[in-house]
Amino acid sequence: AVSAKGAFMGNLIKNVDNTIKKTEEIVGNIVTVRDGIDKLVKDLPEKISKQIDEAIGPYIEKLDTFIVDVYDPRKKELDEIMDTIRGIQTALRGDTRDVVDRLKKPADYLLEIDNLSDEDRLDQEIKIDDISSRYYKGQIIPSSEGMEPISAELRKIRDILTRPLELAFMGVEEVVAPVPIPIGEIDPSKTWFVGDY
């Protein structure tokens, strides 16, 4: 839609520009013809020149009045309007280029949220969170509701594993050795290790 509007505006400006140029060309040709007729009349003998000048003089005067009073002011207005439109177009092209360059780096663009006021930043963060978590809310949450029995069993296991153990008195239990330790003289050349090392 944007490119269609741009193409339409481009064609409109081009057509107006062409119309202005054609009008300039027509008025220029009329002025050239007027100057040519004026020169031709002046080159004629004075008696003939005076008669022709009296006949066409009012028309030439009307033409000159039209050019000065109507054509020149309107042409000036149209030129100013076209210059303004061209200036706006140039500014919009620059703005569009800047936006496209910013969108090429979406993370940097999103980080600009930090430059907003606290209220605006919070509002934008909520909106970004809503968009970024839609898949989770739409897919993951409904499917996790069917896992409730499994979750209940996992909670029981967690409770058992986190329950404190009851230890014997003072936390020490007597350990009974599987083989009684011999009491008596110990031969220093003998050890408990296999092979008497």
Image (cartoon, rainbow, N blue to C red):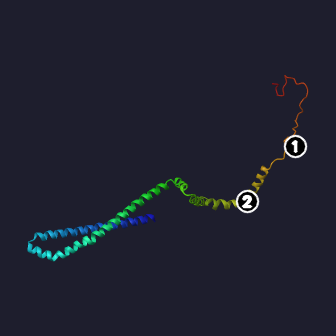
Query: In the rendered image, which residue does mark 2 sit on?
Result: 148
Image position, residue 15 (x, y; %): 34, 67
Q: Residue at x 64, y 61 (%)?
A: 137
Q: Dot 1, how many residues are within 10 Å of its Cα: few (below 14), some (14-19), or many (20+)?
A: few
Q: Identify which residue, 37 or 131, lies in the foreground.
A: 37
Residue at (55%, 54%) from the top-left corner?
114
Residue behind mark 1: 169
Element marked by disc 2: helix
Numbered disc 1: secondary structure: helix
Assign the C terminus to one quadrant of the image: top right
In the depicted structure, whether residue 48 falls above or below residue 151: below
Name the residue: 77% across, 50% down.
162
Horizontal arrangement in the rendering, residue 27 relative to residue 155 (left or right): left
The amino acid type of the residue labelled 1 equals Phe
Are there few (<14), some (14-19), or many (20+) residues within 10 Å of tag 2?
few
Q: Quadrant of residue 11?
A: bottom left
